Image: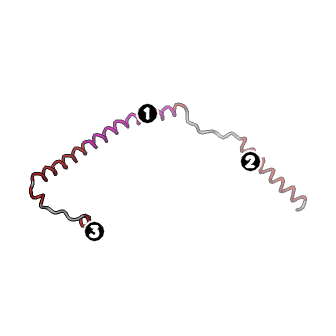
Amino acid sequence: MSKHREITVRSLVALCLAAVMAVSILSVPADAATSGEIHKEIDALEGKNKAIPARIDAVRSRYDADYKDMADIVNGREALTRNCPLTDKIEHPPPRFAYGR
């Protein structure tokens, strides 16, 4: 390499490094939330947290109602089986035919 070309390459590298250093020195504004905004988010989350037990209770009551309905159906079927002599004579198909195989 010629001496002039070597000086030009070194100058370009030095210029690039100086530009990187200059950019890193410049202050970049941070977008941080204020404490008031954080408190608002916390309050909103606490409000949602208070609503969760009510939703759990609603699901639990629906489950209990469905379970009661299912128990009534099973008990009704058992009563029908006990009280109807015809059900003893009904032959159920073997499992291989029960699922359409």
Q: Is 68 displayed left or right of 87 in the figure?
A: right
Task: Report the residue at 19% width, 49% height from top.
Answer: 74
Q: Which residue is mark 1?
A: 46
List x then y, in percent, for residue 40. Answer: 48, 33
The amino acid at mark 1 is Glu
Q: Is residue 72 magenta?
A: no
Residue 20: mark in rendering? 2
Task: Report the residue at 16% width, 63% height from top.
Answer: 91
Q: Which residue is mark 3?
A: 101
Q: Which region is colored magenta?
A: 37-64
Q: In what element is the residue under mark 3?
A: loop
Q: In what element is the residue under mark 1?
A: helix
The amino acid at mark 2 is Val
List x then y, in percent, for residue 66. Answer: 25, 45
Q: In what element is the residue under mark 2?
A: helix
Residues at marks 1 and 2 touching, judged by CB atoms closer than 8 Å: no
Q: Quadrant of the C terminus?
A: bottom left
Q: Residues within 10 Å of mark 3 (few under 14, many from 20)?
A: few
Q: Quadrant of the N terminus?
A: bottom right
Q: Earlier in the sequence, mark 3 or mark 1?
A: 1
List x then y, in percent, for residue 75. Answer: 17, 47
Q: Earlier in the sequence, mark 2 or mark 3?
A: 2
Q: Is 101 displayed left or right of 87 in the figure?
A: right
